[in-house]
Amino acid sequence: MARNTIVCTTKNHFEMTRMCLESLTASIDMAMHEIILVDDNSTDATWSLAENFQIIRNRKGGLYRSWNIGIEASESEFVTVINNDLLFPQRDWWFWVEKSLRETIFEFVYPVDLESLRLSPKIYHLVGRAAKENDLVVHSGFGDIRACCFSGRRDLFKNISSFDERFQVWYGEKDFEIQLIRAGIPYGKVINSFVQHLGSATLTDKGRGAYEAAKRSDYQAFLDKFSSAELSDIGLTLPAFGPHRLLDGASPNCLEGVPTRWLTDHDYDYR
């Protein structure tokens, strides 16, 4: 049995999915992992991947439903959820993720998310610097869980309520984060581990306007579910609707020595 199940969600964008899977399989030992694709009714060549990968169809659709379906199908010790618009420039990214789950108090972790649609030599500089690091570094998370890549023990996902499928493209992971905080479950960012996120590149099938409308609808649904007082009680605040952040924690978490500057609604520059 594989040690880790990697759940990859898909919805069209076959070429990007193929690029993600090529990058992923080159970065891990496949004997330790199984990959499950959960497809949201693709109409392109995505299902041709069934020749080499297990694919489950999400007939009702929805990103967070796809996550739930993939996690439910896993029988591994660990589950890792990824988007199909990721690249894996660091071969040992999983080594540090697994080490953090086995050797620290953290029960849910995520790599540093280098978000950029552009090729940046800075990314590979950071990967090279991480390769020289012998000691695991995990920063305690708070209000900073992002959707593109995260890992935890399968039992954790079974014990915490499933992702809320009422959300479309945002806030499902933030709803889950609130559950972790309330349950006192420690989670954090693995500073030694890096992935490159191509920034919501697969979520705009119906046009930019429809995507923005879905995000705004999710924002309102989140406001309807959690009052400001509820968030305040656990040390979080919800900022006004905007593209660059979802929840604000008391201690913002960022990669030391690598400040970020917001460029567009889906592109960071690391300088």
Image: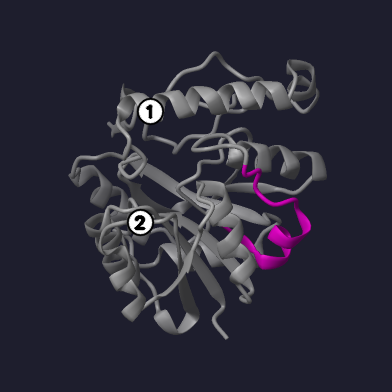
Residue 45 appears in the rendering:
yes
Bounds of the magenta segment? 151-165
Position of residue 218 in the picture relative to residue 199 (left or right): right
Between 225 and 270, the one lying in front of the other is: 225
Q: Is residue 260 above or below residue 117?
A: above
Q: Residue at x 50, y 48 (%)?
A: 63
Position of residue 254 in the picture relative to residue 116 (left or right): right
Task: Please identify the quarter of the rendering in which residue 133 is found.
Answer: bottom left
Residue at mark 2? 42
Question: Which numbered disc flags the more N-terminal residue, 2 or 1?
Answer: 2
Between 40 and 191, the one lying in front of the other is: 40
Picture coordinates of residue 158 (x, y %)?
A: 73, 62
Picture coordinates of residue 198 (x, y %)?
A: 30, 44
Placement of the C terminus among the 4 image quadrants? top left
Q: Residue at x 42, y 62 (%)?
A: 93
Task: Please identify the quarter of the rendering in which residue 246 is found.
Answer: top right
Looking at the rendered structure, which numbered label has been put on residue 83? none
For the residues labelled 2 and 1, the Cα–Cα distance comes to 18 Å
Looking at the rendered structure, which numbered label has been put on residue 210? 1
Between 262 and 172, the one lying in front of the other is: 172
Q: Secondary structure at mark 2?
A: loop
Residue 196 colored in magenta in the image: no
Looking at the rendered structure, the kind of residue marked 2 is Ser
Looking at the rendered structure, the kind of residue marked 1 is Ala
CB atoms at circles 2 and 1 under 8 Å apart?
Answer: no
Q: Residue at x 73, y 17 (%)?
A: 228
Residue 159 colored in magenta in the image: yes
Q: Secondary structure at mark 1?
A: helix
Position of residue 204 in the picture relative to residue 37 (left or right): left
Tell me which colouring the rendered structure shows.
one colour
Placement of the N terminus among the 4 image quadrants? bottom right
Q: Is residue 131 above or below residue 194?
A: below
